[in-house]
Image: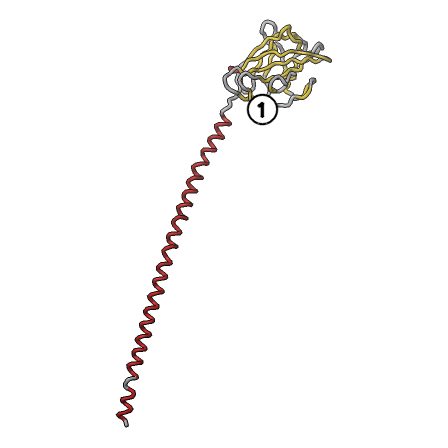
Amino acid sequence: MPEQSLMRRTPILPAAVLLTVALLLAGCGSSGGTSSTSSQGAAPASAASTPSTSTTSTSTSSTTTTAPTTSTATTAAVSGTPPCRAAGLSLSFLGQQGGMGHGEIGFALRNTSARSCRTYGYPGILFLDQYGGPLPTVPHHTTNDFFGSTPAARLVIAPGHSASFRLDVGHGVATPNGCATAYALQVIPPNDTVTLRTAIPNGAYECRDANVSPLRAGTSAYP
């Protein structure tokens, strides 16, 4: 009886061993599959980061190159128009009229140069007698005189074009300062120290004090 029992148990052990081996082999196969999937997923992430870095670098380079060009162009445009100087101007007499003790005398500064120039403000003036000698002259800069309002304006005078100003003087009225007849006017343009002269046909009566208007475009200061 013991011999039969032993013979029946002997085949059970190899079956258990085979089952264990099978389970171990299955586990090894599963582990190898997981490792392969992880390796394939890492490659696309590395490739995607490269174009992003290249795009950022290109954008920064473009911005740095454009900015100085715009700044230089703006500076050149502003500094390209020089101030009007006596060497590039001519002075002329426009006319005179009077009423109620005031005389209005008009003058123009014409751009005789080959390029535009800029100007702003009031010319310096000096009345001259018939021999070219100086007469007592007291200028008063104003935008409002007996003949109206003349606001100051920044002007750019093209070649061949003019800016004008007017003088408001005592006309036919005796004053304690005394009056005289001016036959010419000496002018210093704004932004300069060099003088220009022009004759006043038939002379103009002046009594020392003169209201001087700012320069205006064309002949608008003396319409």
Residue tagged by mark 1?
154
The three-letter amino acid code for the residue at tag 1 is Arg
Q: Residue furthest left?
A: 3
SS label for mark 1: loop
Using the image, determine if residue 101 lies above or below residue 26.
above
Q: How many marks?
A: 1
Query: In percent of the image, x 40 and y 47: which residue is there?
Result: 53
Q: For residue 198, which quarter of the picture?
A: top right
Rendering coords of residue 86 (x, y %): 53, 15
Return the residue nearer the eye: 98 or 185. 98
Q: Residues within 10 Å of mark 1 (few under 14, many from 20)?
A: few
Q: For residue 176, which quarter of the picture?
A: top right
Return the residue nearer the eye: 7 or 184. 7
Rendering coords of residue 97 (x, y %): 68, 11
**Left or right of 147 in this view: 91:** left
Using the image, determine if residue 58 lies above or below residue 4.
above
Query: In percent of the image, x 41 and y 45: which residue is there?
Result: 55
**Left or right of 26 in this view: 203:** right
Q: Residue furthest right?
A: 100
Q: For residue 223, which quarter of the picture?
A: top right
Rendering coords of residue 194 (x, y %): 53, 15
Q: Residue furthest top?
A: 131
**Left or right of 161 in this view: 59:** left
Return the residue nearer the eye: 87 or 94. 94
- What quarter of the picture does the N terminus occupy? bottom left
Rendering coords of residue 61 (x, y %): 41, 40
**Image coloring type:** secondary structure
